Image: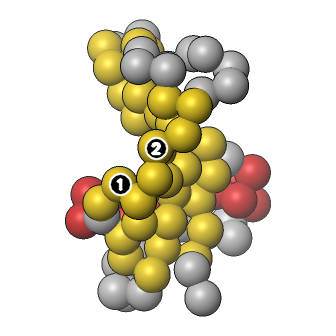
Amino acid sequence: MRRLQSGKIHEDDAIASIMNGCIRQARKDEMETSIDGRKYAIEGTDRAGLPFETIGKIIDGEEGREYFLITAYARI
C-alpha cells in the first residue's frame, strides 16, 4: 500500500494484473485473517503489458468479500 500511496505504482496497474493474471503460488496466511487461510501471488501484466505481480488475500470486508492487497510490484 505504501507503493500505491507514494505513487511508485499505479492502482490501475495492480488491478489490471489481478484481472488478467493467474495464481502463481498460494501460501499460508500467517496472520490468519483471510477467509481460507491463504494469501496468493498473482502474476499478470500491467496496463502497458509488462510483467506485474501482486500478493494479497481474500478477506471479509465491510462490503462483503474483497481482495486485500499486501504488495504489488513490476517484475523486471
The amino acid pointed to by label 1 is: Ile
Residue at the (41%, 35%) spot, across then down: 67
What is the residue that sits farthest to the left in this orientation? Answer: 20
Whether residue 56 can be seen here:
no
Point out residue 18 in the picture as x, y percentages from the top left corner. Answer: 35, 56
Q: For the residue marked with disc 2, what is the amino acid? A: Ala
Residue at 45% x, 53% y: name it. Answer: 25
Quick check: 29 left or right of 61? right
- Above or below, 44 relative to 33: below
Say which residue label 2 marks.
Answer: 26
Q: CA distance from mark 2 to mark 1?
A: 7 Å
Label 1 sits on a secondary structure element that is: strand
Q: Which of 29 and 10 lies nearest the eye of the viewer?
A: 29
Circle 2: element type: strand
Name above or below for residue 64 compared with residue 27: above
Q: Quadrant of the C terminus?
A: bottom right
Left or right of 12: which side holds 4? right
CB within 8 Å, label 2 to label 1: yes
Relative to 45, is 37 on the left or the right? right
Residue 26 pos. (x, y %): 46, 43
**Mark 2 neighbour density, 10 Å: few (under 14) some (14–19) many (20 or more):** some
User: What number is the disc on residue 23?
Assistant: 1
Q: Residues within 10 Å of mark 1 (few under 14, many from 20)?
A: some
